[in-house]
Protein backbone atom coordinates (compact mmCIF):
# COMPACT_ATOMS: atom_id res chain seq x y z
CA UNK A 1 0.00 0.00 0.00
CA UNK A 2 1.19 3.53 -0.78
CA UNK A 3 0.12 6.65 1.10
CA UNK A 4 -1.97 6.70 4.26
CA UNK A 5 -4.31 3.81 5.13
CA UNK A 6 -8.02 4.00 4.38
CA UNK A 7 -9.89 2.52 7.32
CA UNK A 8 -13.62 1.84 7.24
CA UNK A 9 -15.53 2.10 10.52
CA UNK A 10 -19.06 0.77 10.89
CA UNK A 11 -21.53 2.35 13.32
CA UNK A 12 -22.82 -0.96 14.68
CA UNK A 13 -26.33 -1.25 16.10
CA UNK A 14 -27.78 2.29 16.31
CA UNK A 15 -29.56 1.41 19.57
CA UNK A 16 -26.32 0.28 21.25
CA UNK A 17 -23.12 2.07 22.17
CA UNK A 18 -21.61 1.75 18.68
CA UNK A 19 -22.43 5.27 17.41
CA UNK A 20 -21.38 6.70 20.78
CA UNK A 21 -17.92 5.13 20.88
CA UNK A 22 -17.32 5.88 17.17
CA UNK A 23 -17.98 9.59 17.75
CA UNK A 24 -15.91 9.63 20.95
CA UNK A 25 -12.99 7.80 19.32
CA UNK A 26 -12.91 9.90 16.15
CA UNK A 27 -13.14 13.12 18.16
CA UNK A 28 -9.84 12.17 19.84
CA UNK A 29 -7.66 12.57 16.77
CA UNK A 30 -4.47 12.87 18.83
CA UNK A 31 -4.95 9.26 20.00
CA UNK A 32 -5.39 7.87 16.47
CA UNK A 33 -2.92 7.17 13.66
CA UNK A 34 -2.96 9.45 10.63
CA UNK A 35 -5.41 7.90 8.17
CA UNK A 36 -8.49 8.40 6.06
CA UNK A 37 -11.37 7.17 8.24
CA UNK A 38 -14.56 6.29 6.39
CA UNK A 39 -17.69 5.82 8.51
CA UNK A 40 -20.24 3.39 7.09
CA UNK A 41 -23.62 4.20 8.58
CA UNK A 42 -26.61 6.50 8.73
CA UNK A 43 -25.86 10.20 8.59
CA UNK A 44 -28.98 10.87 10.64
CA UNK A 45 -27.90 8.46 13.39
CA UNK A 46 -24.44 10.01 13.39
CA UNK A 47 -25.84 13.54 13.56
CA UNK A 48 -28.11 12.63 16.47
CA UNK A 49 -25.17 11.11 18.32
CA UNK A 50 -22.99 14.16 17.83
CA UNK A 51 -25.77 16.41 19.16
CA UNK A 52 -26.24 14.16 22.19
CA UNK A 53 -22.53 14.41 23.01
CA UNK A 54 -22.09 18.06 22.07
CA UNK A 55 -19.44 17.14 19.50
CA UNK A 56 -19.01 17.91 15.81
CA UNK A 57 -16.95 15.71 13.51
CA UNK A 58 -15.51 17.39 10.37
CA UNK A 59 -17.03 14.91 7.91
CA UNK A 60 -16.67 14.86 4.15
CA UNK A 61 -18.55 12.60 1.71
CA UNK A 62 -16.76 9.37 0.80
CA UNK A 63 -15.75 9.37 -2.87
CA UNK A 64 -14.99 5.71 -3.51
CA UNK A 65 -13.74 6.36 -7.04
CA UNK A 66 -10.82 8.40 -5.68
CA UNK A 67 -7.53 6.52 -5.94
CA UNK A 68 -6.32 8.13 -2.70
CA UNK A 69 -7.90 10.10 0.11
CA UNK A 70 -6.28 12.79 2.26
CA UNK A 71 -6.19 12.14 5.99
CA UNK A 72 -9.49 13.03 7.61
CA UNK A 73 -13.01 11.83 8.32
CA UNK A 74 -15.47 10.69 5.64
CA UNK A 75 -19.03 9.40 5.64
CA UNK A 76 -20.63 6.82 3.39
CA UNK A 77 -24.22 7.79 4.25
CA UNK A 78 -26.37 4.65 4.26
CA UNK A 79 -29.84 6.02 4.92
CA UNK A 80 -31.08 3.28 7.24
CA UNK A 81 -32.81 2.70 9.62
CA UNK A 82 -35.75 4.56 8.16
CA UNK A 83 -37.62 4.62 11.48
CA UNK A 84 -36.23 5.79 14.81
CA UNK A 85 -34.63 3.17 17.02
CA UNK A 86 -34.79 3.42 20.79
CA UNK A 87 -31.47 3.57 22.62
CA UNK A 88 -31.01 0.47 24.71
CA UNK A 89 -33.63 -1.63 22.94
CA UNK A 90 -32.77 -4.29 20.31
CA UNK A 91 -35.00 -4.28 17.23
CA UNK A 92 -35.28 -5.68 13.72
CA UNK A 93 -34.62 -2.17 12.37
CA UNK A 94 -31.41 -1.90 14.36
CA UNK A 95 -30.31 -5.38 13.35
CA UNK A 96 -30.88 -4.72 9.66
CA UNK A 97 -29.12 -1.35 9.86
CA UNK A 98 -25.99 -2.73 11.54
CA UNK A 99 -25.83 -5.56 9.01
CA UNK A 100 -26.12 -3.18 6.05
CA UNK A 101 -23.32 -0.99 7.42
CA UNK A 102 -21.10 -4.04 7.85
CA UNK A 103 -22.00 -5.54 4.47
CA UNK A 104 -21.14 -2.30 2.68
CA UNK A 105 -17.80 -2.00 4.50
CA UNK A 106 -16.88 -5.56 3.50
CA UNK A 107 -17.81 -4.84 -0.13
CA UNK A 108 -15.54 -1.79 -0.15
CA UNK A 109 -12.70 -3.80 1.42
CA UNK A 110 -13.11 -6.51 -1.22
CA UNK A 111 -12.96 -3.82 -3.92
CA UNK A 112 -9.79 -2.47 -2.23
CA UNK A 113 -11.39 0.92 -1.61
CA UNK A 114 -10.41 0.48 2.04
CA UNK A 115 -7.52 -1.53 3.46
CA UNK A 116 -9.18 -2.32 6.78
CA UNK A 117 -12.53 -2.29 8.50
CA UNK A 118 -13.23 -1.69 12.18
CA UNK A 119 -16.67 -2.85 13.22
CA UNK A 120 -18.60 -1.36 16.12
CA UNK A 121 -20.72 -3.85 18.11
CA UNK A 122 -23.81 -5.52 16.69
CA UNK A 123 -26.54 -7.43 18.51
CA UNK A 124 -26.99 -11.09 17.65
CA UNK A 125 -30.53 -10.84 18.99
CA UNK A 126 -31.30 -7.91 16.68
CA UNK A 127 -29.80 -9.75 13.69
CA UNK A 128 -32.12 -12.65 14.52
CA UNK A 129 -35.09 -10.28 14.79
CA UNK A 130 -34.19 -8.96 11.34
CA UNK A 131 -34.32 -12.49 9.92
CA UNK A 132 -30.57 -12.72 9.27
CA UNK A 133 -29.11 -16.23 9.32
CA UNK A 134 -25.66 -15.26 10.64
CA UNK A 135 -24.94 -14.97 14.35
CA UNK A 136 -22.33 -12.28 13.93
CA UNK A 137 -19.56 -10.68 11.90
CA UNK A 138 -17.23 -13.70 11.86
CA UNK A 139 -19.96 -16.12 10.81
CA UNK A 140 -20.86 -13.86 7.88
CA UNK A 141 -17.21 -13.63 6.81
CA UNK A 142 -16.71 -17.39 7.07
CA UNK A 143 -19.14 -18.01 4.20
CA UNK A 144 -16.67 -16.35 1.80
CA UNK A 145 -13.48 -17.00 3.75
CA UNK A 146 -13.69 -20.47 5.32
CA UNK A 147 -10.32 -20.06 7.06
CA UNK A 148 -11.51 -16.98 8.99
CA UNK A 149 -10.56 -17.33 12.66
CA UNK A 150 -11.83 -15.35 15.63
CA UNK A 151 -8.86 -14.11 17.67
CA UNK A 152 -8.33 -11.59 20.47
CA UNK A 153 -5.31 -9.32 20.73
CA UNK A 154 -3.87 -7.33 23.63
CA UNK A 155 -0.46 -6.52 25.08
CA UNK A 156 -0.77 -9.00 27.96
CA UNK A 157 -2.52 -11.87 26.16
CA UNK A 158 -3.38 -13.18 22.69
CA UNK A 159 -5.95 -15.92 22.02
CA UNK A 160 -7.41 -17.70 18.97
CA UNK A 161 -10.62 -19.75 19.12
CA UNK A 162 -11.40 -23.11 17.54
CA UNK A 163 -15.13 -22.32 17.86
CA UNK A 164 -17.01 -19.26 19.03
CA UNK A 165 -20.73 -18.44 18.87
CA UNK A 166 -22.24 -21.89 19.26
CA UNK A 167 -23.66 -23.72 22.30
CA UNK A 168 -21.04 -25.40 24.46
CA UNK A 169 -22.50 -28.85 23.78
CA UNK A 170 -21.88 -28.33 20.04
CA UNK A 171 -18.44 -26.82 20.61
CA UNK A 172 -17.23 -29.92 22.45
CA UNK A 173 -18.14 -32.11 19.47
CA UNK A 174 -15.71 -30.12 17.32
CA UNK A 175 -12.70 -31.14 19.40
CA UNK A 176 -11.47 -33.87 17.05
CA UNK A 177 -8.07 -34.58 15.58
CA UNK A 178 -9.18 -33.71 12.03
CA UNK A 179 -10.85 -30.41 13.03
CA UNK A 180 -7.91 -29.40 15.18
CA UNK A 181 -5.35 -30.18 12.51
CA UNK A 182 -7.26 -28.03 9.99
CA UNK A 183 -7.55 -25.25 12.55
CA UNK A 184 -3.83 -25.35 13.40
CA UNK A 185 -2.80 -25.12 9.75
CA UNK A 186 -5.24 -22.25 9.08
CA UNK A 187 -4.06 -20.43 12.20
CA UNK A 188 -0.42 -20.82 11.19
CA UNK A 189 -1.07 -19.51 7.68
CA UNK A 190 -3.07 -16.52 8.93
CA UNK A 191 -0.45 -15.57 11.51
CA UNK A 192 2.29 -15.76 8.88
CA UNK A 193 0.34 -13.23 6.79
CA UNK A 194 -0.92 -10.94 9.54
CA UNK A 195 1.61 -10.85 12.35
CA UNK A 196 4.81 -8.84 12.40
CA UNK A 197 6.61 -11.48 14.49
CA UNK A 198 6.61 -15.29 14.70
CA UNK A 199 4.41 -16.82 17.39
CA UNK A 200 4.69 -19.96 19.46
CA UNK A 201 1.21 -21.43 19.94
CA UNK A 202 0.22 -23.15 23.18
CA UNK A 203 -2.83 -25.39 22.79
CA UNK A 204 -5.25 -25.62 25.67
CA UNK A 205 -6.62 -28.94 26.85
CA UNK A 206 -10.33 -29.44 27.26
CA UNK A 207 -10.74 -31.33 30.53
CA UNK A 208 -9.50 -30.50 34.04
CA UNK A 209 -5.74 -31.15 34.30
CA UNK A 210 -5.76 -31.77 30.51
CA UNK A 211 -7.50 -35.07 31.17
CA UNK A 212 -4.97 -36.41 33.71
CA UNK A 213 -3.87 -39.17 31.30
CA UNK A 214 -7.44 -40.23 30.56
CA UNK A 215 -8.76 -40.13 34.12
CA UNK A 216 -10.91 -37.06 33.40
CA UNK A 217 -11.69 -37.49 29.73
CA UNK A 218 -10.04 -38.70 26.55
CA UNK A 219 -10.41 -35.65 24.27
CA UNK A 220 -6.77 -34.77 24.99
CA UNK A 221 -5.76 -37.82 22.95
CA UNK A 222 -7.32 -36.14 19.89
CA UNK A 223 -5.55 -32.88 20.71
CA UNK A 224 -2.19 -34.61 21.23
CA UNK A 225 -2.43 -36.36 17.87
CA UNK A 226 -3.20 -33.11 16.04
CA UNK A 227 -0.39 -31.24 17.80
CA UNK A 228 2.06 -34.06 17.06
CA UNK A 229 1.21 -33.98 13.35
CA UNK A 230 1.64 -30.23 12.87
CA UNK A 231 4.82 -30.20 14.99
CA UNK A 232 6.26 -32.91 12.76
CA UNK A 233 5.57 -30.60 9.81
CA UNK A 234 7.53 -27.83 11.50
CA UNK A 235 4.73 -25.71 12.97
CA UNK A 236 5.43 -24.08 16.36
CA UNK A 237 2.65 -25.72 18.40
CA UNK A 238 2.80 -27.36 21.84
CA UNK A 239 0.22 -28.93 24.10
CA UNK A 240 -2.30 -29.71 25.28
CA UNK A 241 -1.74 -27.85 28.52
CA UNK A 242 -4.16 -27.78 31.46
CA UNK A 243 -6.72 -25.03 30.80
CA UNK A 244 -6.23 -23.53 34.26
CA UNK A 245 -2.51 -22.84 33.69
CA UNK A 246 -1.99 -22.36 29.94
CA UNK A 247 -3.06 -18.70 29.98
CA UNK A 248 -0.62 -17.99 32.80
CA UNK A 249 2.18 -19.38 30.62
CA UNK A 250 1.23 -16.87 27.89
CA UNK A 251 0.52 -13.84 30.05
CA UNK A 252 2.86 -10.98 29.25
CA UNK A 253 4.66 -12.93 26.51
CA UNK A 254 4.54 -11.09 23.19
CA UNK A 255 5.67 -14.17 21.26
CA UNK A 256 3.03 -16.60 22.59
CA UNK A 257 -0.60 -17.12 21.51
CA UNK A 258 -3.04 -19.55 23.14
CA UNK A 259 -5.25 -21.73 20.95
CA UNK A 260 -8.46 -22.11 22.98
CA UNK A 261 -11.07 -24.75 22.18
CA UNK A 262 -14.31 -22.82 22.74
CA UNK A 263 -15.56 -19.29 23.30
CA UNK A 264 -15.56 -18.88 27.07
CA UNK A 265 -12.38 -20.89 27.61
CA UNK A 266 -10.50 -18.15 25.76
CA UNK A 267 -12.63 -15.09 26.51
CA UNK A 268 -12.88 -15.35 30.29
CA UNK A 269 -9.12 -14.98 30.89
CA UNK A 270 -8.74 -12.52 28.02
CA UNK A 271 -11.42 -10.12 29.24
CA UNK A 272 -10.18 -10.45 32.80
CA UNK A 273 -6.81 -8.95 31.84
CA UNK A 274 -7.68 -6.78 28.80
CA UNK A 275 -11.37 -5.85 28.72
CA UNK A 276 -10.79 -2.11 28.24
CA UNK A 277 -7.97 -2.45 25.69
CA UNK A 278 -8.49 -5.82 24.00
CA UNK A 279 -9.27 -6.13 20.30
CA UNK A 280 -11.23 -8.75 18.38
CA UNK A 281 -9.30 -9.64 15.20
CA UNK A 282 -10.52 -11.82 12.33
CA UNK A 283 -7.53 -13.73 10.96
CA UNK A 284 -7.50 -15.44 7.57
CA UNK A 285 -8.98 -12.58 5.50
CA UNK A 286 -7.51 -10.75 2.48
CA UNK A 287 -8.12 -7.48 4.33
CA UNK A 288 -7.80 -6.34 7.94
CA UNK A 289 -10.80 -6.56 10.23
CA UNK A 290 -10.82 -5.58 13.89
CA UNK A 291 -13.45 -4.64 16.46
CA UNK A 292 -13.79 -3.88 20.17
CA UNK A 293 -13.85 -6.93 22.42
CA UNK A 294 -17.26 -6.01 23.89
CA UNK A 295 -20.88 -5.93 22.78
CA UNK A 296 -23.63 -3.38 22.27
CA UNK A 297 -24.09 -2.71 26.02
CA UNK A 298 -27.77 -1.87 25.60
CA UNK A 299 -28.02 -1.39 29.37
CA UNK A 300 -25.79 1.71 29.37
CA UNK A 301 -26.45 2.98 25.83
CA UNK A 302 -29.01 5.64 26.92
CA UNK A 303 -26.54 6.98 29.52
CA UNK A 304 -23.71 7.70 27.04
CA UNK A 305 -21.06 6.65 29.55
CA UNK A 306 -19.34 4.05 27.32
CA UNK A 307 -15.54 3.90 27.23
CA UNK A 308 -14.17 4.05 23.64
CA UNK A 309 -10.81 2.56 24.70
CA UNK A 310 -11.25 -0.83 23.04
CA UNK A 311 -12.44 0.78 19.79
CA UNK A 312 -9.43 3.12 19.80
CA UNK A 313 -7.13 0.10 20.19
CA UNK A 314 -9.00 -1.66 17.36
CA UNK A 315 -8.41 1.37 15.11
CA UNK A 316 -4.73 1.48 16.03
CA UNK A 317 -4.25 -2.21 15.29
CA UNK A 318 -6.12 -1.88 11.97
CA UNK A 319 -3.85 1.02 10.96
CA UNK A 320 -0.72 -0.88 12.01
CA UNK A 321 -1.67 -3.92 9.94
CA UNK A 322 -2.65 -1.78 6.95
CA UNK A 323 0.76 -0.15 6.75
Image (cartoon, grey):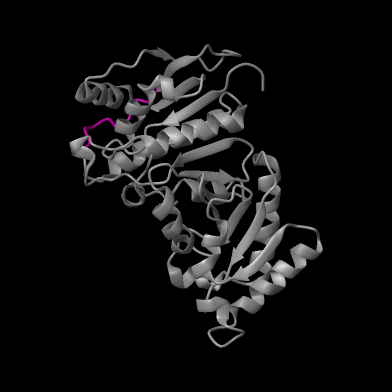
Is 84 positioned to the left or the right of 57 in the image? left
Q: In the picture, which quadrant includes the N terminus?
A: top right
Magenta region: 77-86
* Residue at 45% across, 54% down: 270
Q: Nearer the viewer, residue 195 or 57?
A: 195
The picture places residue 71, in percent across and down from the top left corner, at 50, 14
The picture places residue 153, in percent across and down from the top left corner, at 52, 46
The picture places residue 216, in percent across and down from the top left corner, at 53, 85
Q: Is residue 110 visible?
A: no
- Asked if residue 187 is positioned above or below residue 209 in the image, the reply reads above
Residue reaching furthest bottom? 215
The quadrant where residue 242 appears: bottom right
Q: Nearer the viewer, residue 269 or 79?
A: 269
Predominant secondary structure, magenta span: loop
Q: Is residue 84 magenta?
A: yes
Q: Is residue 46 visible?
A: yes
* Residue at 60% across, 33% down: 321
Q: How many marks?
A: 0
Amino acid sequence: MTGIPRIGITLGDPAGIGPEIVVKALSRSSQLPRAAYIIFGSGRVLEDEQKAQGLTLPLRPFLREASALPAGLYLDDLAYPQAETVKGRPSAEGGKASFLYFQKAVEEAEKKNVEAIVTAPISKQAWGMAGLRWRGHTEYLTQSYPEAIMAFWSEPLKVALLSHHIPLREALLLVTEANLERFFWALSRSLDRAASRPFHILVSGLNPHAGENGLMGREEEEIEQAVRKVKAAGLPFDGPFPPDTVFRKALGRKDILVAALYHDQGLIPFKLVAFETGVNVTLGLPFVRTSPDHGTAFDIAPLRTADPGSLIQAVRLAAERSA
